[in-house]
Image (cartoon, grey):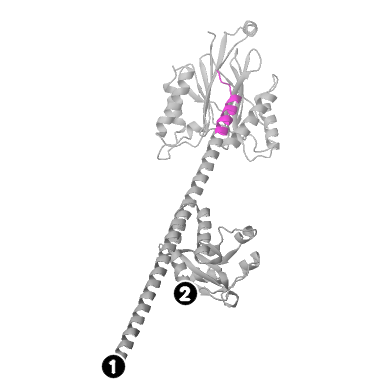
Amino acid sequence: MNVLVGVLVVVCLMAVIQWQRSQRKRLDAELELQRTMQLFDVSLEVNSTIKKQDLLIKIMETSSRIMNAEASSVILVDEDKGELFFDLALGEKGDEVREIRLRIGEGIAGWVAQTGKSVKIDDAAQDERWSSKVAKRVEYPTRNMLCVPLVSKGKIIGVLQVLNKRGDAPFTDRDLQLLESIASPTAAALENAMLYDALEKSIHALKITTAAKERMESELRIATDIQMGFLPRKSLCLRSADSVEAKEGLEPAQADAHAIIRPAREVGGDFYDYFCIDANRLFFVLGDVSDKGIPAALFMAVTMTLLKGKMTAVMTPGELLTAVNQELYKDDSTMFATIFCGVLDVASGQLQYSDGGHCPPYVVRNDGSVELLKGKKGLPLGVMDDTYYLNNEAMLGIGDRLILYTDGITEAEDQQLEQYGFERLKQVLNREQTSDAEQLLAHMVKDVDGFANGAVQSDDIAVLLIDRNRLK
């Protein structure tokens, strides 16, 4: 009998133990199911948006809800500066919190970012790693907390922390494990969002840059139109006055002025001008500003305005350059301009000119000879305020041609950085003696381009031709 009772007791105990085990298994299964559902919930939440700011809000709200915590925060790593920062902070003190930066290793969050280890703190204020830098700003007391690293592709990109478990209960080890599980999909989604955010910022910056470039190009086109508006658009033909021819017994003649200009950029510093001083005299000028782009174009515009405004019927080219130079020097500009200007008496062919450090012009004579027009040179305009510019004189016979040019012609370079030079220019002038003015201008530029053979040119090109011929 006693044996039977003993057996029954053992059987009952085994049944109870088995039941308890089954209950524990069922409870564990329920907890595991609950944990799986929570992680599934987290995955749905964090993968519902690619916007970084929206994602950070979802991470904090979801973490607080699942962990039954009062608050949650995500602190990101700034690799370049070795710091942690709050990319998003909500509430009245949000702006102040975003100003806070923690060094890697500073505070509990800094320690987690440095070590890559998760931590559970039951009494935050008593922990030696505790930093009150954030708490003092937001005036929010932290009792207990969990803090885990956000790791993506082996790199710590931030930390996730939850603060103050509701109900005054401490966080458990199971809570820490759950938060670590939450951190894994969160980190992957966060890195994708950060990449997308960087891409958006790059696209935005590109749009701004493109818009600025388009606006600048538009402004440069306007500047080009304004600059070209200063230059004569048509050639000029001045016939000698009948009264002068009759009085001095001269052969009726005419002078024709033609020019071409090609800036190396949208706007440049080369310029030319020609106009009639009176019924028998033609004024002409060709210049080259030392700089390029809009500053040079402005300096060019000022120079051309002064040249045209100060030139009078009784003024010589040297006097004109002296007066203009004094005005330009007053502007305290670092730029200067080489310049060549002259006055041609169409009836007699007398040429009076002044040279402010410019390239020496060529004269193609009616007999086929090509020679440099030599004379006393002065400094470029704008270099010294007390410079006095001298006058030179020469004669242009019937059928003679005067060619002025800027150093964009002679200093043009090919792929091997060899310069075009004076000799090649002289060869073109010899070869093109029978060409009319328009053809010569086109062939000169074409020959320079052929020599350069695609090499990018850094200087403007300008050429001015003065032909003195029999009256047609």
Callout 1 secondary element: helix
Q: Is residue 384 visible?
A: yes
Residue 415 image-quadrant placement: top left
Q: Earlier in the sequence, mark 1 or mark 2?
A: 1
In the rendered image, residue 5, in percent from the top left (x then y), is placed at 31, 90
Q: Is residue 132 shown above or below 448?
A: below
- Secondary structure predominantly adopted by residues drawn in magenta: helix
Residue type at mark 1?
A: Val
Q: Which residues are magenta?
A: 218-234
Residue 50 at x, y percent in the picture: 47, 52
Q: Position of residue 214 (x, y in %)?
A: 53, 36
Question: Which quarter of the figure is the N terminus placed in?
Answer: bottom left
Q: Return the mark for residue 173.
A: 2
**Within-10-Å neighbours for mark 1: few <14, some 14–19, many 20+:** few
x 47%, y 49%: residue = 199
Single out the residue that lies furthest toward the front: 1
Label 2 crowd bin: few (<14), some (14–19), many (20+), radius 10 Å: few
Q: Nearer the viewer, residue 186 or 461?
A: 186
Point out residue 262 in the picture as x, y percentages from the top left corner: 51, 29
Q: Secondary structure at mark 2?
A: helix
